[in-house]
Image (tube, rainbow, N blue to C red):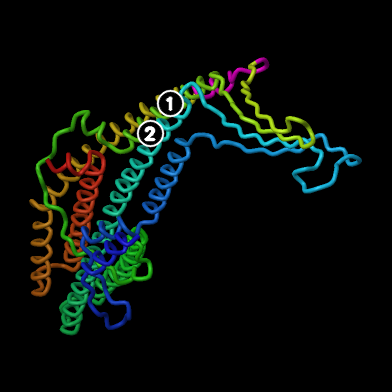
Amino acid sequence: MYKSSLVLVAALASIPCAASNDSDQGSIALTLSAAETLLVSQNRDLIASRRALVGAQADRLTAGQRPNPELSVSTLSIDPRRIGAGPPWEKSADTALQISQSIERGGKRDLRSAAADHNVLAAALDVEETQRQQRFMLRQAYFDLRLSQERVSISRETVMAFRRTLDAANLRLKSGDIASADVSRITVDALRAENDLRQNAADLERARVALAYLIGLEARAAGIEAIDPWPDLAPLPDMPGNEALDARPDVRAAAERANAARKAAQLAVAQRSRDVTVFAQFERFPGQQQNNTIGFGVSVPLFLNYSYEGEIRRAESDRYAAQDNVERVRALARTEIARAWSDLSSARERVDRFEGQLLASARRAADASEFAYKRGALGVMDLLDARRSLNATQLDAAAAHADHAKALASWRAAVGNAVAER
């Protein structure tokens, strides 16, 4: 608990906060690495998976224990008419003190401990798997926030550009250079741009809330800003081999649960090894010449009616199901890796096209149209078309960068950061 508190304090200290004029909470300039640090200590799903690991460790402690001995005391042969005088231990009654111990045979305790060991390993791997999934969701949410911020910025620039264009159109209208219908067309597009800005601002707030939940900062969601740039374009990675597949925590956890199921099946068969209960007894009967005696005994179960056939069949069924689940998880992991590679390849090509030619051409066309319109060399419809084209291209370019960033996050989650960064 103390270590977790130190991690949280360090993570919060690494987040630069700037005072805001309209909020007492302030803004949070959040990097992706700082968000991942907060994820480790604050994410609720991760905390729940750690609790499950503690429970599995407790089950391991239980599985390794021997049965406790039992102590029993009984008083028999009591005749109320002839109970006699004197202290209780001199009364005419037969008192027996017995201690018994059950002895497990067939290696049951070792099998229980081995199954519990595999379950502990599986629970620890579940923590890794939960962290893998939550880190992937965090990166998706972080770049969704980054995209929402880009869209708001682009919408604001578009609104300002339409306002400048509308000012220029009003000047030309006063001079009689254009018709009032042209000013109306510009006004309609300017109002549409303001509506888009409002919608993008609402999407930005939703993206902040989604990210804040993953890192436990819901109370400060309104001030979160993603400040990391888009990831750089890197050469397309090669498809990894089976080592990346076998290293995934979900595959390893499924394999450990299959091992636990195998031990559980062996434990079910071991139930046919009869456990032995031994006991020792001390008996006292006052008034007799030899009033203190001792005795020993042993008991074993008789499998006359039932021999654990149902438990054995059930354990075998669970063992086969666990083995089938290993293959299912491996197949899903292989599909996830292939899909992530395909998405990353496609997203990288889109970013190349936008950054290589599309975005620059749209900016040049919009600037030329603005310049020509102000000097009366271009009609209003051509200007609006150029402005719409630039706005759409800028939004598509931002979306392409977001898709690439999320595809890269998906690839790293699918194959593991260590393999992805080779």
The C terminus lies in quadrant: top left
Direction right: furthest residue: 81
Tell me which corner region of the image, top left, top right, bottom left or bottom right, holds residue 275.
top right
- Front one among 95 and 148: 95
Residue 105: % across, % down: 50, 23
- Front one among 51 and 337: 51
Residue 234: % across, % down: 10, 45
Q: Are marks 1 and 2 in contact (CB under 8 Å)?
A: yes
What's the distance in space between the residues labelled 1 and 2, CA to CA?
A: 9 Å
Residue 172: % across, % down: 16, 80
Q: Which residue was labeled with disc 1?
A: 263
Q: Amino acid at mark 1?
A: Lys
- Front one among 282 and 245: 282
Question: Residue 280, relative to residue 172: is it above or below?
Answer: above
Question: Residue 78, relative to residue 273: is it above or below?
Answer: below
Q: Is residue 324 magenta?
A: no
The N terminus lies in quadrant: bottom left
Q: Is residue 351 left or right of residue 89?
A: left
Specify which label sits upstream in the sequence, 1 or 2: 2
Question: Residue 334, relative to residue 347: is it above or below?
Answer: above
- Front one among 84 and 50: 84
Q: Secondary structure at mark 1?
A: helix
Residue at 32%, 77% in the rendered image: 25
Q: Secondary structure at mark 2?
A: helix
Question: Residue 136, relative to residue 299: is it above or below?
Answer: below
Q: Magenta residues?
A: 304-316
Q: Which residue was labeled with disc 2?
A: 118
